[in-house]
Image (cartoon, rainbow, N blue to C red):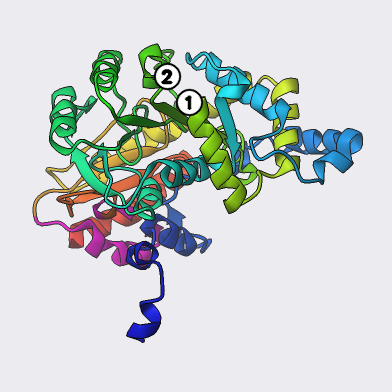
Amino acid sequence: MDSVRSHLNEYVTALGRSPVRDLFEISLDPALISFAGGNPAPELFDVDGLAAAFSAVMATEGGRAMQYSSTDGEPEMREAAAKRTTEMGVPTSPDQLIITSGSQQGLGLLSQTLINPGDVVLAENPSFVSALQAFGLQGAEFKPVDTDEAGVIPEALESAIEKWHPKAVYLIPTFQNPTGITMSAERRRQVADILAASDTWLIEDDPYSELRFTEEQQIPISADQRLDDRAFLCNTLSKVLSPGLRVGWVRGPAHVLERMSAAKQANSLQTSTIDQLAAAYYLAHNDLQAKLDGVRAEYRARRDAMLEGLREGLPEGSAMTEPEGGMFVWARLPEGHDASALVYDAIRAGVVFVPGAPFYIAEPDPRTLRFSFVSNDPEHTREGLSRLGSVFDRG
């Protein structure tokens, strides 16, 4: 067995399974109430609008939609992605981005293009598990950057860069996964100052910023023009339109995008032609921002139900974040609790959450856990947290 195992790629061999994906499989049981995956509420999808987009594309350009297409992305989709990125506060032209099969492929392509075995990648601690997997497949060595309730601490980032000389810094500044924390505008300016003075790539992941519950729009760090030669901004339609569509993009320096395109050719040839054309048609013929108003209002109500239920149901001495958008609440149980040990007790009680330990780069806190508040309406959220109360009492 050892001789067979020795023929596998060492980084794939060392790669652990994602606890989120494993629990997602369990959560498909309709008897369970799941707070595990960051799944948009399916009843809020614009099914009719997307069906009309696919029908229009097939009626007018069916042959093209069913054919191979450009690795970099269809012109209409690149134009639409550039427009959306510009509206986010990052002026972008179509030639400054590559279309990907969701932002996860973007992270994978960035890791293949930028990271060599042993290269140091700095990240928030805790951070997005699937990003850690993507960089881990290339043999990245992760180092944590200290954070507080306002995100990455600038002094800690500067110190980590001086100490570790990292190849890249990976950040989720807005409604971070898993904590829900948002970095302030002042912190973003400080982080940009530090990165502008360094020789370090910035990989900025921004899948959640349009799911905000206030009028304040946070501008990505990548908007700072001093970072144009070193910043990558990853975005996606998964959280605002449909994760099944698998359309995302990466904005970055042209010479790196060209190498990412070569990696994508070797990896998957292209992103689905029909999905790109349908997404571009949808964005051209619908006011997505107006449609998101209703989604944001519903998600805010679901967040409020989650926070209210957690205040009542978590053991005394617990703490939690109160996100202003996104999908997740991060909680910490009192001393003596182990969230991982409670997972299967929770499943037997009919509810699923994600323990926090796997999100950590270093020094995992076993008391932490992540709740997704978007997948269940307030009534089901209250019922799920009621079931969970008995588990915490026993824990």
Neighbour tally class for label 2: few under 14, some 14-19, many 20 plus, Cα within 10 Å = some
Magenta residues, as a range?
336-357
Q: Can residue 31 be seen at all in this image of the molecule?
A: yes
Amino acid residing under circle 2: Asp
Q: What residue appears at the point 41 percent right and 45 percent down from the top-left corner?
A: 111
Q: Nearer the viewer, residue 211 or 35?
A: 211
Q: Nearer the viewer, residue 225 or 299?
A: 225
Q: Nearer the viewer, residue 50 or 9?
A: 9
Neighbour tally class for label 1: few under 14, some 14-19, many 20 plus, Cα within 10 Å = some
Report x, y in % for residue 37. Answer: 44, 50
The residue wearing badge 1 is 253
Amino acid residing under circle 1: Pro
- Report which quarter residue 230 is drawn in: top left
Q: Can residue 239 be seen at all in this image of the molecule?
A: no
The residue wearing badge 2 is 228
Residue 353 among magenta residues: yes
